[in-house]
Amino acid sequence: MITVVQENSAWIMVDKPAGWLSVPSRLGKADSRPCLGKLLEVQLNQRLYPVHRLDAEASGWIIFAKTPEAQLQLTQRLTNHLWEKTYTAWTEVPKDPAALPPLGILQEWQSLLAIGKKRTYDHPQGKPSTTLATLIEVRLDGEDAPMAIWTLTPKTGRRHQLRYELSKRGFPILGDLRYGAIGPCPKSFFDHPETAIALRCSQLKP
């Protein structure tokens, strides 16, 4: 059963598990990963219209519109950056903990991002990207330590923006092998850590 976070007559917000597609991939039925949008339509017995996506490896809150009109309205708000989105990321810690920024200090990260064949990268001709980031906790001892925990607010919507920005600064997300993580996500995070990264959309206000 897919967990419903919030619902009204125009849209429904649900919690996407890590490892699930938001919408069908280009491979169609040849892609064996669960598809959130399709399974939610079956659960509700209702046609839904995608408004945005989360990376398959990530988890968290995502919205589907119930009508084409609601889809258009929500998409326009998204395009005009009127959404409030907050992510939580659990990342690796540099070998030298002194490289960590102070706790609780809001940082603004800016890059020019271009989309490559397999990953996003910095490029002089890339599109401007802005991310607000705050380091909220560092765990150096205990289960699954060491790790750093961040809250992130993307002010732009570039592909893999948060994954790239953290990796660029030496803090790859746990399990994100594409962007420099040293191994899969810890088993305590997800049922299937081999398909997951420790990045979660934890708050969403359309």
Image (cartoon, rainbow, N blue to C red):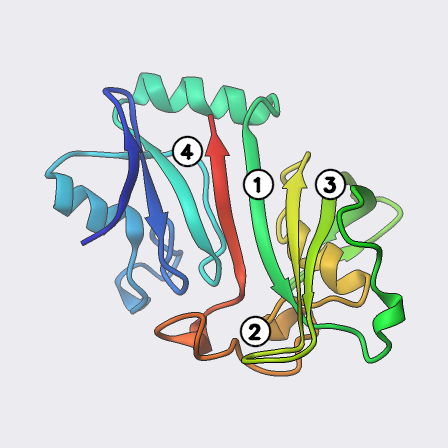
Q: Which mark is residue 127?
A: none
Which of 26 and 132 lies nearest the eye of the viewer? 132
Residue at 23% of width from left, 20% of height from top? 9
* The quarter of the displayed image where residue 30 is located: bottom left
Amino acid tagged 2: Gly
Task: Estimate the x, y position of residue 107 in percent, counting from the top left.
Answer: 81, 43
> Does residue 185 appear left or right of residue 72 in this picture?
right
The residue carrying mark 4 is 51
Residue at 82% of width from left, 61% of height from top? 169
Identify whether 64 is placed above or below 151: above
First reached walking from the N terminus: tag 4 or tag 3: 4
> Does residue 90 appear left or right of residue 95 in this picture?
left
Work out how far the residue at label 3 is from the one at label 1, CA to CA, in angstroms: 10 Å
Residue at 44% of width from left, 79% of height from top? 187
Task: Estimate the x, y position of residue 190 in percent, counting from the top left.
Answer: 40, 70
CB of mark 1 within 8 Å of CB of mark 4? no
Amino acid tagged 3: Leu
CB of mark 1 within 8 Å of CB of mark 2? no
Q: Which mark is residue 175?
A: 2
Work out how far the residue at label 1 is from the one at label 4, CA to CA, in angstroms: 17 Å
Task: Estimate the x, y position of residue 186 in percent, counting from the top left.
Answer: 50, 78
Work out how far the residue at label 2 is from the one at label 4, CA to CA, in angstroms: 27 Å
CB of mark 3 within 8 Å of CB of mark 1? no
Asked if residue 75 can be seen in this view, the reply is yes
Amino acid tagged 1: Thr
Work out how far the residue at label 4 is from the one at label 3, CA to CA, in angstroms: 23 Å
Look at the numbered disc 1 and give the secondary structure of its residue.
strand
